Image (cartoon, helix red, strand yellow):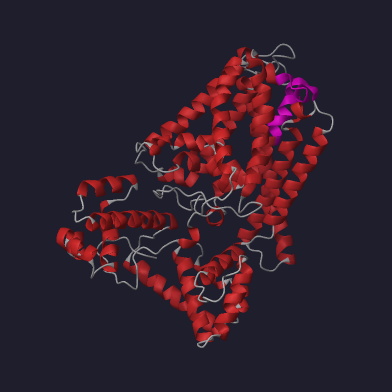
Amino acid sequence: MANTSPRRSASPDTPLLPVLQPLAPQADPEGWFGPVKKIALAVFVGVPIFALLAPSLAGRVVWTVLIAGLPLFIVLVGYHRWRRLCPLAFLAQIPARFNRSGERRAPQWLEEHYYYVAFGVFFVSLWLRLNATNGNGYAIAIFFVILSLAAIAVGFLYTGKTWCNFLCPVSFVEKIYTEPHGLRETANSQCDKCTACKHGCPDINQENGYWKEISSHSKKVVFFAFWGVVFGFYFYYYLQAGTWNYYFSGAWTNEPGVIDSTFLPGHDPKTAGFFFLPWVPRALASLLTLSLFALLSYQVLSRLEAPLGRWLRHRYQDRGEVNIRHVMFSLSSFGAFVTFYIFAGAPTLRRVSWAPHFFGILVVVVATLSLVRRLPRTRKSFAEESVARNVVKRWAWADQQPPGNLREAFWVHTIRLRESEKGYEQLLHTYQEAVRETAADGLVSGEDLRLMESLRDMMLIKPADYEAIIAELAEQERTRVSQSPQQLTPEKRLQLDSYADVLKGYLERVLGAGGIPKDSFMNHLRSEYRVSREEHLAVLDQIFHAHGKGELGLVYLKHWGSPEESAS
């Protein structure tokens, strides 16, 4: 890992801030994306207006059409596309667009427990639906306005995508249905000006964040409880009315008076909390139902994890705790998705005789394809692909373009390396450099490296040489840690790398025009990227060593002195 300390000397051969090319965003080529984003924003902004103008229709349109279709839409378009389409994300970034975003970062407790927070907001939102916003157009309008203002306020107070990553009630649902990766590969959704607001940022690399968080207890609790909350939400309609017709008829989409009696003891079918205990207030009954099914779902899935793990270890020898948890997450996600669409949208779909059957088939096909794509995935396969990408990135054959398929490109590159003049020696060097870069990017750990036998075998690397490479990399890592305990995360590296590119461009433009760099502008730039003074000096250190004999190096010496003097 690189060191951000300005006291560290560097050389042109060992750049301070390695470029993260494998993680860089790509332009989305689809022409539909721009118009769809505008439509999504217009629909979101129009919801409260529509709810006020047509309160009797608002519940049906919002809950049985728009919200009902959202999870399926996210799965079909892909996680990163949705992150760029999401209207709430757009609103949360409004302060940044006007250079008014906050400088605070999410506190450590939120970083560690944000799944609980996002799930809590989601849970309260469901509870509000059952007691106020389901069939009251005015309550729907208020709810959407408050949600929008909350997103904007967080954008003013905190840096980066703090709202999207830590607080948004949809954030963990997106992950449940699309992690570790969706039905097809999509360009990532990282910010143009990364401020390293989250460790394991899913916008930079969704799968990397997934494997880093998979052992998190808060993630386990939320992912296991989610299925129960989904079922409990819809089952409450039956528990309240004593008949499924109450839900499937859509009568609940136009009940503006529910909130008047929700905190009072019930006395008839309309005011009952439970049809078998009508005197229980609806607010309490719905809270108990959601909580009970969340707890039940968590307990059942937690108890199933151990026997499933034993079976997987017996059948597949390489299934460790992490991969067993991954299988559990995949199965619970499949169950929650299918359960949701047994009910979601049904009151409106049933108005067209063939629609429920067609939609049901579509849901099952999408859910099954997602499960089939997710289940075989392992942490080791992700690590191997990460290294393979960095191997292919070192493509050295001008007479042939690398194939589009990663596996094919890796094979061709490996074969041609072995057939080259230096042969095996060059192959070892390429592999070592690719592994070093992948480890530096934070995409693999030492444990992952030792598990990558298949990649080693594909390259026909001798076990002794492979162990020597791993041992050398481990020694380099120990040396780095002893010299700098601070670990440079992929998010921090991307932040500083982006800042370095912009700062270098500014210095080159100023010098090209015969001007003098202004500290005021660089301070403004540092504020935009949320870069500390020490990190700024480290970046200048990198620029100086990369251009030590050129104009930038001379300007550095004239205005800031040597790197060591700048540090002091």
How far from the left and from the top, in percent, is residue 69? 67, 35
Q: Quadrant of the C terminus?
A: bottom left
Is 266 inside the magenta-drawn segment? Answer: no
Q: Image check: 255 left or right of 538?
A: right
How far from the left and from the top, in percent, is residue 311? 74, 61
Task: Residue at 72% x, 14% y: name it.
Answer: 270
Choose between 48 and 442: the one closer to the eye: 48
Residue 64: image quadrant is: top right
- Magenta-tinted stretch: 231-252
Inspect this view and state whether residue 442 appears: no
Choose between 539 and 113: the one closer to the eye: 539
Task: Residue at 40% x, 74% y: name it.
Answer: 476
Q: Image check: 137 left or right of 84?
A: right
Q: Quadrant of the N terminus?
A: bottom left
Majority secondary structure of magenta residues: helix
How many labels, in total? 0
Task: Residue at 66% x, 48% y: name it.
Answer: 302
**Above or below 349: residue 139:** above
Choose between 238 and 209: the one closer to the eye: 209
Farthest residue, direction right: 353
How far from the left and from the top, in percent, is residue 212? 53, 56
